[in-house]
Each structure stands twice: as C-alpha cells, then as structure tokens.
Amino acid sequence: MYDERLTAPRSWWLLPVAAGLSLGLILLRFGPVPGLIGLLVGFVAAAIGLSSYGSARIRVVQGSLVAGQARIPLSALGAAHPLNAAEAVAWRSVKADPRAFMLLRSYVRTALRVEVVDPADPTPYLYLSTRDPEALAAAIGAGQG
C-alpha cells in the first residue's frame, strides 16, 4: 500500500494573497466595498485553484496504481525506474515521449518512470512526480507479486 498527496509547497500559498491584493487594488478604484469584495474573491478563487492543483494523489491500492484521475491495473505495468532530480528533468523534457502519461508537478524534484506493457495501450510509460520514488517503485513491485 502506498499513498502520497502532491501538495503544493507552503511558499506557494503567498500566490492567493497576491491575487487577492491585486484584485482588491484593481477594484478599489470603485470604492472600498468593491475593493474588499475583490480582495476576498481573488484570494478565495486563487486558494481553490491552488488547492485543486495540489490535491493530486498517487496510490497503490487493490491491484491498481491510481495517479491523479488515472487508474491502471498493476498487471499492465512493467519495470519501475526511480529518477533523481537530473534524470527527472531529462525525462520530462528532451527524453519525453508525447504519448506518455505524465502526472507532473514542477515543485517535486524526483519522479518514477513506469513502463506500460499492455500491448493494447499506446502509452509507452508513466511519468509520476513523487517525493519518494523508491518507495513507490517497491509498492508497485510488491503489488505485482
């Protein structure tokens, strides 16, 4: 069993504050009430967007790998290759295959590349941003039996 949530870093929570201040200042021209409403709406909208972006999960449960909205049976997966920071950059840029499934979060430096062995699936591999690629690879291997 493996479960990881790819939450956004704490420093990114300054972005909703900046968005709220920006919208508040823009609407302040129309008076203090619209400025306050802009502040609140800007902050809440940006916070919801950031929370949604940082809610991606990677799980290995009940014989499946669940990555974001995708659910892949472990029997359709091959070897898992943990990637350090430099390899992760290469596999999401110059070595990337456009057919690959990518659950990419720029603030997570390491990743796991998992080969797809299902002949009916055109996806060559999965690229999963993860903070602990070795543990995820071990969970996939354990689930494959």
Image (tube, grey):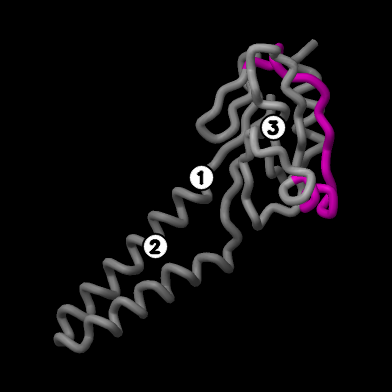
Marks 2 and 1, how far apart at CA:
14 Å
- Is residue 100 found inside the magenta-colored segment of the image? no
Q: Which mark is residue 55?
A: 1
Q: Range of the magenta residues?
A: 73-91
- Mark 2 secondary-structure assignment: helix
Q: Which mark is residue 46?
A: 2
Hey, which quadrant is residue 109 in on the image?
bottom right
x 76%, y 14%: residue:
144
- Mark 3 secondary-structure assignment: strand
Q: Nearer the viewer, residue 74 or 102?
A: 102
Q: What amino acid is found at the position of numbered circle 3 in the picture?
A: Leu
At which x and y percent is residue 75? 71, 12
Q: Which mark is residue 126?
A: 3
Q: What amino acid is found at the position of numbered circle 1 in the picture?
A: Ser
- Mark 1 secondary-structure assignment: loop
Disc on the earlier residue, 2 or 1: 2
Count how many numbered circles sit on residues in the image: 3
**Location of the N terminus (image quadrant):** top right
Q: Residues within 10 Å of mark 1 (few under 14, many from 20)?
A: some
**Location of the C terminus (image quadrant):** top right
Disc on the earlier residue, 3 or 2: 2
Marks 1 and 3, how far apart at CA:
19 Å
- Is residue 85 found inside the magenta-colored segment of the image? yes
